[in-house]
Image (cartoon, helix red, strand yellow):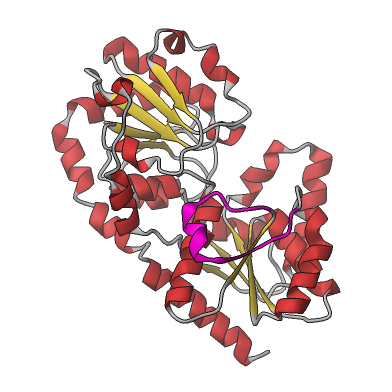
Amino acid sequence: MGQGGVERSFINLSIELIKKGHDVKFVCLNKPKSAYSQELSVIKLNSKRTLFSMIKLSKVIEYEAPDILISAQYYANIASIISNKISKNKTKIIISERNHLTSALTKYSLLKSLLIKFLIKLTYKRADLVFGNSESVCKDLKEKFVFNNLKVKKILNPAFIENILKQSEEKVNDPWITDSDVPILVYVGRLEAQKDIDTLLRGFELINKTHKSKLLIIGSGSEKEKLDHSPLYKKNLIKQIEFDENPYKYLKYCNVFLLTSIYEGMPNVLIEAQILGMPIVATNSPGGTSEALLNGKAGLLANMKDAEDISKKVNILLTNKEVVSKLSLNFEKSLERFNPINVSDQIILEATNLVKIK
């Protein structure tokens, strides 16, 4: 929750692979934000843009001579494949897509979107394996981007339950949170267009008409100014905390977790909210949101961009303990899917098969 979901997933995966005796180097543009990155051997490219780092990455590939290179997100995937192509030492490449790609590209202009699609189709076919982190992401890849019978597999995000539970025990010194006499709703994530902050705020305003509550927002981004314009922010019913290395400590004081995205991959925040036993309302957007919540059995799904439906679902969780209890009974079954041992075993199996045919 604290840092980006992709970075967090790959740090978790790297740590698990190291535990199993593998030599892992974590390559990034700049220093990772997570404290857990201290357990890793980190190679910083010291570059502001992924696509501008290809020469540096090709040199890393030459020097380190890895058996397998694993990358995530289309910009890094494109750069990794091109870097490997120009490197003197060729390696097997596994690329990972962490968002519903068709939806993600709609944020760009038509020309830029077409250019990125062209680059994806040109480069992805040179990968040895593509994996997505949800059924929806994999289906989108197969239908729109990946051809030539290239294998596409689903490999879920790993979640470290014990670490999250331990971090949640840290003390919070903020009376707005700890001494609240009304329910607190919480959103954790970037304040960007993908997360549909407008609907989050409209939904919260509707909730307050029937059930006085507060909204805690943990995260920052380009749409932060929208908070300032909310009348409830001015009434001190909305609080924003910028990036925090440990957001879990706040969640034990919150009553409902909200996610209003217009697309996702496999949202880590929903996995982590389940670990902490939180009732959840999330929009049923393209990607893995529904899958993360066992198609509505581990959290309530609301219509996308529908503030009224979000308000209705939140009010159910605030007033109906039977519904909350029924949803929580499915958390254990849901979380079994994200066991880091199983996830890393899948990666190791696929990587081993690729190295055998190198």
Tell me which corner region of the image, top left, top right, bottom left or bottom right, holds residue 105. Answer: top right
- Residue at image position (50%, 31%) is 242
At horizontal 33% and vertical 35% (from top left) the residue drawn is: 250
Is residue 45 one of those drawn in magenta? Answer: yes
Residue 147 at what x, y percent from top left? 70, 68
Task: Give the residue at the far left of this rendering.
Answer: 322
Q: Nearer the viewer, residue 323 or 273?
A: 273
Q: Residue at x 84, y 80 (%)?
A: 88
Describe residue 217's horizontal placement relative to residue 250 as left or right: right
Q: Residue at x 46, y 48 (%)?
A: 267
Q: Is residue 144 magenta?
A: no
Residue 133 seen in the figure: no
User: Would residue 272 be found to the left or right of residue 197 on screen?
Assistant: left
Image position of 164 (left or right of 259) = left
Q: Is residue 312 above or below residue 346?
A: above
In this rendering, does residue 139 appear at all?
yes
For residue 253, which quarter of the picture? top left
Q: Quadrant of the N terminus?
A: top left
- In the rendered image, the quadrant that contains the C terminus is bottom right
**Residue found farthest to the bottom:** 356
Name the spot of residue 15 as percent of width and height, x first. 46, 68
Q: Is residue 61 above or below residue 181?
A: below
In this view, 253 is above or below 59:
above
Number of disc labels = 0
Give percent across and percent down for residue 150. Answer: 66, 74
Observer-nearest of 115 and 4: 4
Q: For residue 234, what is the image quadrant?
A: top left
Q: Position of residue 59 (x, y in %)?
A: 80, 71
Magenta highlight range: 30-46
